[in-house]
Each structure stands twice: as structure tokens, then as C-alpha cells.
Image (tube, rainbow, N blue to C red):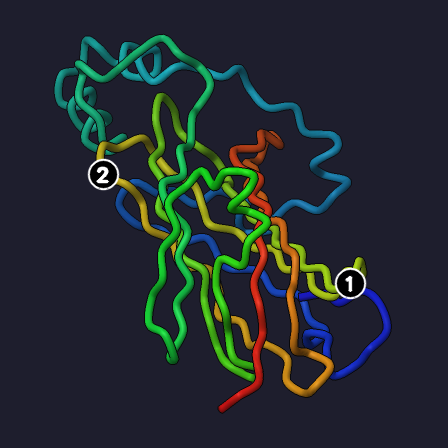
Amino acid sequence: MEEAGPSSAGNFDEQRREQPAEEASGKQSDASEAGEYDADDKDGFTPGPLLSLKEQIDKDKDDESLRRWKEKLLGCLESDLSEQMEPEVKFHSIGIISDESGEINTPLPVNENQSRRVLFTLREGSRYQLRLTFTVMHNIVSGLTYSNKVWRGGLLVDRTQGMLGTFAPQREPYVETLEEETTPSGVLSRGIYLAKLKFEDDDKRCYMELEYSFEIKRSS
């Protein structure tokens, strides 16, 4: 996590973290997720042509066992395949998890009026995590990353970014929990914060930008 602006009791700890890519059903890690390429390598890298899932499976249509294996790996049935090239990520909810209040979920998308309200309240010095529920459709999403910026009184006080991983299309939603954070403590930390959460893939496609507010209150 990185911190911008003067250091004070109201600011978050200065650090930057990345979540490692996970290998699970419906996910595949790649070299870019593991941080294997630096900025110079990426600048000289030209990605191959984007193929629809139907094209990827049809390449092996003469090999029935391989074709079925691909369908199972991609988490979809033949009837769901389409010619659409671009992947689609639909976010269903954002949750806040804390020891004090358990889990509070907000359906997405959040309308403009609601985004200006306080979505959740935390105690100073408490630990919490954000949890996202989303669905991937049409094609594989490679290297899905998130960034979360927090402002207080117009000053950027916190910036976090991390890697979620690579996700194949499937009917069931994915549920991903972001890394644990700790709210600042002290009289200067109390008040309303504005934040912006953004999700992009390796090709810099933006799937969601969410502006929200939260409040930090005095510990009881």
C-alpha cells in the first residue's frame, strides 16, 4: 500500500501489497500475473489475436476427448458458446467484512445518489476486508487486477492494488475477498472518506469503477 500526502495519525500505513495469483478451478495463472515481466518487457510485447471460446474449442473439434476436456476446463457448455470475442465481467455485490459487524453486502451497481452516502462504518484501528461477487461471461479474463484509492478532505491518503487472477467463464459467480486492511486510529482519523475501486485486465479493459464513501468512528 502506498500513501500520499503528509504523514499523520489520520493516514493509513505506508506500504504497497500485491496479492498472488491463485490456481483454482476456473482460474489459470500466467507469467504476467506472477510479475515475471517488467515494464520494459510489456512495452515490447504484442499479444496474439483474441479468439472466441467457440473458436478455441472448434480448433480441436476432431479430437472429442480434448474438446470435452476444454469445455470442462472453461466451465461452460457447448450451448453457451458464442462468437463474442470480448470477455464480460458483471459485478453483483460488494461486501465489507469486519470482526465488529460481520459481513454487510451492497448490491451492484450502486446508483449515483447511493454512492455519495456512507456505505459502511468502521471503528478506528479495526481490521476489515472487501468481498466482491461477480460473473465472467463470453471469454477468459486474463490478469484481473484491482486498485482502491482513498481520499480524505481532498487529499489522497491511501492507495492499494493487487492481482485477483485469471478467470474462465462459468455460470456460478466468483467470490473474491481482497487483502485485509486496518483502519487508522487517533482523533485525526475519524470522519468520512471517499474511495474509488477499479478493476482492469491485462489489456487495460476496465470492468468496473465504483465510487463509494465510508466512515471511521471512535472505538468504544
Q: Label 2 sits on what residue type?
A: Glu
Q: Which quadrant holds residue 77?
A: top left
User: Which of the image's four quarters has the N terminus?
Assistant: bottom right
Going by the picture, which residue comes out furthest to the right?
A: 6
Relative to 49, is 12 above or below? below
Depth order, front residue of 33/6? 6
Distance from Cα at disc 1 to Cα at disc 2: 40 Å
Q: Please say if the residues under marks 1 and 2 sit with CB atoms less than 8 Å apart.
A: no
First in residue order: circle 1 vs circle 2 = 1
Relative to 68, is 54 above or below? above
- From the top left corner, tell me how far across and down residue 31 is, in percent: 53, 44
Going by the picture, which residue comes out furthest to the bottom?
A: 220
- The residue at the point 69 percent across, 71 percent down is 15
Of marks 1 and 2, the one in the foreground? 1
- The residue at the point 78 percent across, 63 percent down is 153
Pointer 2: what residue?
A: 172
Q: Label 1 sits on what residue type?
A: Gly
Q: Residue 153 got which mark?
A: 1
| Crowd class of label 2 (few under 14; some 14 to 19; many from 20; radius 10 Å) | few
Depth order, front residue of 114/166? 114
Q: Which quadrant holds residue 209?
A: top right
